Image: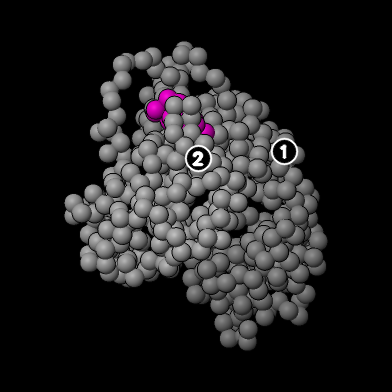
């Protein structure tokens, strides 16, 4: 194994510090990477790595156990509050982001979210294939890594931040060896002692650094101290929009609206970000119709971003109660996202609100087919079948929903149990009532569910206890107490019937 001398002394000094001050973190360091493993990083990413990065991997190929956002396993970190990535994990994470760049329908919109306060140093993008992750936040997809595709004023090999929540990219070091020197200075200052943090089950787990601190913040503080003051410059619309987003998040809707107006006066380019923010401001001010107009513009300019359709539908359904409009919007959303079961569900739910039960049955059925293991999906389909008079099919779906509903889905079991009691053949009714009573006696309830169509179907089928079904539904919904059913003979018998 050939070891160079660019970062070797600094890294060995850091490893020695770990051995003395954080022995559990030191014990978690992995052994050396092979030349083939390092070459694979370069082959997959298509970029030649700085020699210093390769030197460290030749000494320690990341951690033996690594805690990252996608596989949280409570492993101790080997960099203060950050996981040290192996060559394999660097490749895996790079590939995940490469897939996003190649396949996500909203990638162009995402790319416009990226920025850099140092003009021309880092490319103002959300993600780039030339950004190779080296250190990772253990619980979110944010990274410190090497930038091999810098801006025109940048330097290949510079160290930057990037990731899901790191939209503003800063150059923290000119070279990897400078980053290691910062690391050494930080730990030798005593700022990052061995410590403990709460694990996923509340137990104490070994850690490196104060769990309330973050090494990202230390890098940012150093960067800010070294930034030379810049002369005042005209405000950019993007900056004002970010202020508007912060104001809205802080509950200052009026201020956010003022900032949006200011950004527009500065020549802001209208897009899904500005229109969706406008819609959210309108909603915060309960200007529901104005919000719909803004959401309409949002879905017009960015039809591939499903979250905007979802927000638009929520406003139409729950704020405006404009079910006919919502039906047209849901159809457009499903046309733009034909593989989305969420919009199949929205079409079913809107048909339910419109009391268009045949259409509701069609789309609840499609949703149940796409989510065959979902008790709630099967229960909704059972309701729609029962509401349209298809009792035998409703019983089959309700039985599947009842069986699939576990102890955490008591409401679904109550709903399915009611459908079964109301719609099964007479010979099975007492057994189904006994099962439903056991759930109700145990305290399970649904809430404000519309059992009326099921009761109508049961009555039309000459259910022998039809006169009690409305009271049973009231108890199931939590609107009446069990005492209301005490005079009912079948209910009394259900308390002792085998289930």
Question: How many marks do you count on the picture?
Answer: 2
Q: Is residue 317 depicted above or below 482 in this figure?
A: above
Q: Is residue 107 depicted above or below 342 in this figure?
A: above
Q: Quadrant of the C terminus?
A: bottom right
The residue that mark 2 highlights is 148
Q: Is residue 288 depicted above or below 331 in this figure?
A: above
Q: In which quarter of the image is residue 284?
A: top left
Badge 2 element: loop
Q: Does the magenta stretch include residue 116?
A: yes
The front one of 416 and 116 is 116
Q: In which quarter of the image is residue 450?
A: bottom right
- The residue drawn where x is 38% and y is 14% is 234
| Residue 245 percent across, percent down from the top left | 43, 31
> Which residues make up the magenta segment?
115-125
Q: Does the magenta stretch include residue 123?
A: yes
Query: Residue 336's mark?
Result: 1
- The residue drawn where x is 73% and y is 66% is 397
| Residue 25 percent across, percent down from the top left | 32, 66
């Amino acid at each position: 194994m050939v070891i160079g001398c660019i970062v070797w002394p600094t890294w060995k000094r850091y490893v020695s510090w770990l051995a003395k001050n954080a022995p559990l973190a030191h014990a978690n360091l992995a052994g050396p990477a092979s030349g083939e493993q390092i070459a694979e990083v370069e082959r997959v990413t298509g970029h030649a790595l700085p020699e210093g990065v390769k030197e460290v991997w030749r000494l320690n190929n990341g951690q033996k156990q690594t805690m990252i956002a996608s596989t949280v396993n409570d492993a101790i970190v080997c960099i203060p509050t950050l996981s040290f990535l192996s060559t394999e994990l660097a490749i895996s994470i790079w590939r995940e982001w490469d897939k996003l760049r190649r396949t996500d329908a909203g990638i162009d919109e995402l790319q416009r979210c990226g920025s850099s306060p140092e003009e021309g140093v880092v490319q103002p993008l959300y993600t780039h294939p030339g950004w190779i992750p080296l250190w990772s936040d253990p619980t979110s997809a944010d990274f410190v890594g090497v930038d091999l595709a810098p801006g025109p004023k940048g330097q290949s090999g510079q160290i930057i931040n990037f990731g899901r929540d790191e939209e503003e990219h800063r150059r923290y070091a000119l070279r990897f060896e400078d980053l290691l020197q910062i690391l050494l200075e930080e730990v030798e200052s005593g700022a990052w002692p061995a410590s403990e943090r709460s694990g996923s089950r509340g137990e104490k787990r070994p850690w490196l650094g104060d769990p309330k601190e973050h090494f990202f913040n230390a890098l940012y503080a150093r960067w800010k101290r070294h930034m030379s003051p810049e002369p005042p410059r005209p405000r950019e619309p993007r900056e004002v929009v970010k202020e508007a987003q912060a104001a809205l998040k802080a509950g200052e809707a009026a201020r956010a609206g003022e900032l949006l107006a200011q950004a527009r006066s500065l020549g802001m380019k209208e897009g899904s970000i500005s229109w969706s923010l406008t819609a959210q401001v309108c909603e915060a001010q309960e200007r529901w119709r104005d919000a719909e107009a803004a959401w309409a513009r949002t879905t017009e300019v960015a039809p591939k971003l499903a979250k905007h359709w979802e927000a638009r539908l929520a406003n139409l359904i729950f704020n405006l109660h404009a079910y006919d409009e919502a039906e047209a919007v849901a159809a457009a959303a499903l046309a733009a996202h034909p593989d989305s079961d969420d919009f199949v569900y929205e079409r079913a739910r809107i048909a339910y609100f419109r009391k268009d039960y045949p259409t509701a049955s069609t789309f609840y059925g499609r949703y149940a087919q796409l989510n065959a293991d979902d008790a709630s999906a099967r229960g909704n389909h059972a309701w729609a079948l029962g509401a349209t008079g298809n009792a035998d099919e409703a019983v089959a779906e309700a039985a599947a929903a009842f069986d699939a509903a576990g102890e955490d889905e008591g409401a679904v079991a109550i709903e399915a149990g009611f459908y079964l009691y109301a719609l099964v053949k007479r010979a099975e009714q007492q057994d189904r009532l006994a099962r439903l009573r056991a759930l109700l006696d145990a305290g399970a309830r649904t809430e404000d569910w519309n059992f009326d169509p099921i009761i109508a179907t049961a009555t039309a089928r000459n259910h022998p206890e039809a006169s009690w079904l409305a009271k049973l539904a009231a108890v199931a919904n939590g609107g009446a107490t069990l005492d209301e059913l005490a005079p009912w003979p079948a209910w009394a018998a259900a308390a002792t019937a085998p289930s």
